[in-house]
Image: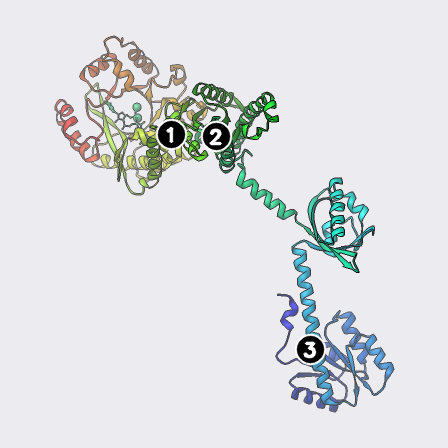
Amino acid sequence: MLKEENKLKPARPRILVVDDEMMMRVLVCESLRQAGFEPIEAADGEEAMGLIQECEPDLILLDVLMPGMSGFEVCSWLRTEQNDQATPVLIMTGLEDVSSIDRAYDTGATDFITKPLNYPILTHRIRYILRQKEITDQLRISEKRLALTQQTALLGHWETIPGDPFVYVSNTARSILGESFEGSKISKKKLFGQMAPDDVEAYQRQLQIGVDTASRVQFEFILNKEDGGQRIVFLDLEPLVKNGEVVKIVGVFQDISDRRNAEKHIYQLSNYDEVTGLANRARFLDKALNKIKYANERRKSVAVFMLGLDNFKVVHQSLGHAEGNQLLIELSKRLERFVRTRNSNKNLTSRAEVRKNINPNCENDLLASLGGDEFALALWGVRQAEEAGWIASTISHLIKAPIDLNGQEIVVTCSIGITFFPLDGSEPDMLLKNAEVAMHYAKSAGKDCYQLFSESMSWQSTRRLKLEADMRQAVENQEFSLHYQPKVKIADGRVSGVEALIRWDHPEQGFVSPGEFIPVAEETGQILQIGKWVLETACKQAKAWADQGTPLCISVNVSMLQLRDYEFCELVSSMLQKYQLESSLIQLELVESMLMDSMDDNSQKMQILRDLGVTIAIDDFGTGYSSMAYLSQLPLDVLKIDKSFIDLLLDDENPVAIVEATIALAHALELKVVAEGVEQEVQVKMLSDLGCDEIQGYYYSRPLNVDDFDLWIADFMGSPQKAKGNHISTLSNK
Ligand code: C2E
Ligand code: CA
Ligand code: CA
């Protein structure tokens, strides 16, 4: 609300009566009071000045002749020094004192009234002046409001006469034009100098149309300000016609730069990916729709490629946000180049067709970023699986070429899913969805490869998506549990420790294998939360067994994403502390393949963990192609030979050499060797001969829940020979 609005319509208007004659004041005040005013009185000019500042009267009734300051002096003080033009001043003068009346007006009085006073006329005049003031006040307020609105809306007034070299503008309009323009009269020449020549031409053309047809014209142009800034200005002009001739052109002039920029920004946000600047999913689907309609009419084919970067979450996590984005930008540029080359080749060959009115835009290939680590392509005219495969290999080579990120060389691979229109879907989103299904297939098949979509894939992908969603509540709903599988030391036949293996009892689907949901959890990042739960549960259990007097070391499987998490070492340390657990009772199993990249970083973290007192095992050894030389650089305690190698021992054709060499080398590095997945006695016998230290596998026991495990171990300790066979079949063994 504007300040003046508070002062409108006081309940009883306050009138300051200034007169040195007391009798006069009493009479005037009394008649004012009776007429519904609230009089206050001052006996001279000085007192009046004080009361004016203090009481803010609505009207001042001022005697001219007073000792000290005269009424004129008070009035001119009010108008000049107080800069108050609004408060009405009614001067009281002697009858027919014309010079006083003139002087009163000169000093800024609103009106005069002659003495002796006619009281009814006095009150009427006061009322009239106050009403007048109220109207003026309201006008001023609405003027101010308008000015304020115009300022906020960056809306100015614009006026010109046909043929006049000037335009006449309001303050706001001038402030839009910039500081180089002064006053309200603006030279058209100067103004045109700051507009693009095309815009000047368009302005003159539009204006001429307006004048010729006597109709309103609207027009937008870019103003290049002298300070280097650029504004977008909107003009809405209306010719004023008198006697059939245009006499003036008036209109509004508005700075719409912010609005245009916001619109542009919104358009950008809703159509393009923020990081890479590529089209986003919405725009892709929109454009692809045109493309397939067009293809349909011409019986052509379109292939949709969905491309997902492999393990990008891990890469992103270890690189940091900014570098991760830099990487995405580089990859998107490569894809853009690929698409551009294809498009330009196409246009060269189809120029003749273009002339035959074929829409080349629809034949162009599309590229989009689907947010994060996924991209989509719609490629025109690809109909053969063979051709698609060839293109997929080209793309994956493009992606795979090393990227230099601040001196660090990064290699990223991708998995690609492919669908064809019309074979795999008639709508863009169906084609994209199915391509995504195929892409996940490619991922699970081992990454860095491509996969064409087939019908049988979709139900499996639905299951995957459901698992992913359900997993979010699984920790909270206590659907996970840990099972424990013993490891037996060959030398003395005693249980040397257990491996904790997670189990998910899904409310609808029952038991879900970790082999199925752990990869999903790793891809979505949920493994961090799940892994934390596993670690805590294992610590709690290790503590419970220790407190019962049967301490057992628990091996916990750790995912790559967990190890990469910069808080992981701290998490392990805090869990040990929380459960007051002897740190040698926890072993961490790291999969061989995950240690291959970021060696330095991993090795440093492993050292920190070992310093805490936990031991570290390398899991699934033999599957990750790592060499012993490389292993020797890592701080390790245990090597677990993968089941696939242990299985070789059952094969007569295969010599035991690989297992034998592995054990020998591990021992040379002072690592303890555990054989995984041992199912048969002959394997135990052979492993024992080869010098293997510990055995884990169904031969002794399947992974068991805590209660079953407690029974098993009691039994086993009583009679190891008896225990081993019985419990495979009799105990619950999910
Ligand atoms: P892994 O770490 O290699 O675990 C050994 C797997 O082999 C377990 O499968 C175990 O039940 C199975 N196994 C043990 N002995 C035998 C045997 O004699 N014969 C056969 N055929 N299999 C045997 P499981 O429990 O299904 O776990 C599969 C994988 O899931 C694990 O492989 C591990 O990579 C992962 N996993 C399980 N629990 C966790 C966990 O808490 N965290 C993480 N990150 N991964 C886990
Ligand atoms: Ca393991
Ligand atoms: Ca393993």
Ligand 2 in which quarter: top left
* Front-most of residues 645 and 103: 103
Question: Earlier along the polypeptide chain: callout 2 or callout 1?
Answer: 2
* Residue 716 in the image, given as x and y percentages of width and height: 15, 27
Q: Secondary structure at mark 3?
A: helix
Residue 716 visible to an observer of this rendering: no
Secondary structure at numbered mark 1: helix
Identify which amino acid the numbered label 3 is placed on.
Arg
The kind of residue tagged 1 is Leu
> Mark 2: few, some, or many residues within 10 Å (few <14, many ≥20)?
some
Which residue position holds label 2? 296
In x, y percent, where is residue 536? 31, 37
Between 200 and 277, the one nearer to me in the picture: 200
**Residue for badge 3:** 131
Colour setting: rainbow
Provide the secondary structure element on which disc 2 rests. helix
Mark 1 CB in 8 Å range of ligand 1?
A: no
